[in-house]
Amino acid sequence: MPEAASAQAARAAIGDSEFDRDTALVPRAPGVYDIDLSAGWTIITAVNGGYLLAVLGRALADALPHADPFTISAHYLTASQPGPAVVRTDVVRTGRTLSTGQASLFQYDDQGREVERIRVLASYGDLDALPDDVRTTAVPPAFPPMDQCFGPQDGPAPVSGSSAIADRLMIKIDPATLGWAVGAPSGKGEMRAWFGLADGRDADPLSLLLAVDALPPTAFELGLKGWVPTVELTVHVRSRPAPGPLRVSITTRNLAGGFLEEDAEVWDSSDRLVAQSRQLARVRLG
């Protein structure tokens, strides 16, 4: 078999990849689901917020009559840890083209009491039913080809267990936003990268919820270090992505009072803007 054909055959399919297995939920009762949050999507010990949003997004796709997230807003209340969790959903409204629901993810403390980790409100529809009429002034981000960008595997070996999520992602960062990695941050709140899943699975609406929160924080290019926990994250899914790698561009325009915003755009291989997001995050100053 030719090498290219062999590589293509090895690619994971949507529905049969590590991402799909690790976001799969077990129904317990109508609208209630159990899941074991995987340690494979952690940064240090905290579970990545985009992975958590995809878990809740999958639960709502099952609970609502429409399958595709159009807009989903999440408030991160407490840090999630790998291990058992329960997701509870509630159908708020159903209509012909849109349905709205809310969901919360809970874990248990040392005394066995439920602790709410994240709460979301979302509207779902059918992306394939949308009219193919695009009128936009947005343009895809300009950065180098993938072979001129750099990922975690191109740098020093990370501390064991420091970022398990990096092994599950294909990230190639634009060198212009990589100064922080060599001790020379640009001072600009920008981060740009090619993005995909390491097993080759193509993107779909649920994995876009991961893509907007998977790059290193823009705070690194502002010269800040340490964890940048998300307080609130809103994602708009605009189109079903075409096969192939995504391009993610994130910018921060304002850091004040120990908080910053990150505005993300996700573009697919056909140069279509397929997702947008804004999040508010806390930063450690000094």
Image (tube, grey):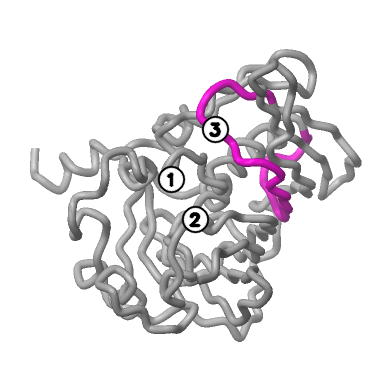
The percent coordinates of residue 151 (x first, y second) are: 26, 60
Q: Are marks 1 and 3 in contact (CB under 8 Å)?
A: no
Q: In the figure, is residue 192 to the left or right of 59? A: left
Task: Depth check: give the residue in front, 221 or 123.
Answer: 221
Task: Using a 10 Å C-alpha cutoff, classify the residue at mark 2 as few (fewer than 14 neighbours), some (14 to 19) or many (20 or more).
Answer: some
Query: In the picture, which quadrant includes the N terminus?
Result: top left
Which portion, as a residue range, is magenta? Answer: 64-86
Q: Which mark is residue 227?
A: 2
Q: Secondary structure at mark 1?
A: strand
Q: Earlier in the sequence, mark 1 or mark 3?
A: 1
Residue at (43% x, 72% y) in the render:
191
Task: Depth check: give the residue in front, 148 or 62.
Answer: 148
Kind of residue indicated by mark 2: Trp
Instruction: Give the CA distance from mark 1 to mark 3.
Output: 10 Å
Q: Say whether residue 280 is visible.
A: yes
Q: Compared with residue 32, is residue 45 higher up or lower down, i.e. above or below?
A: below
Q: Earlier in the sequence, mark 1 or mark 2?
A: 1
Task: Depth check: give the residue in front, 148 or 79.
Answer: 79
Which residue is the site of mark 1? 43
Q: Earlier in the sequence, mark 2 or mark 3?
A: 3
Kind of residue indicated by mark 1: Ile
Residue at (68% x, 21% y) in the render:
33
Which residue is the site of mark 3? 81
Q: Which is closer to the viewer, label 1 or label 2?
A: 2
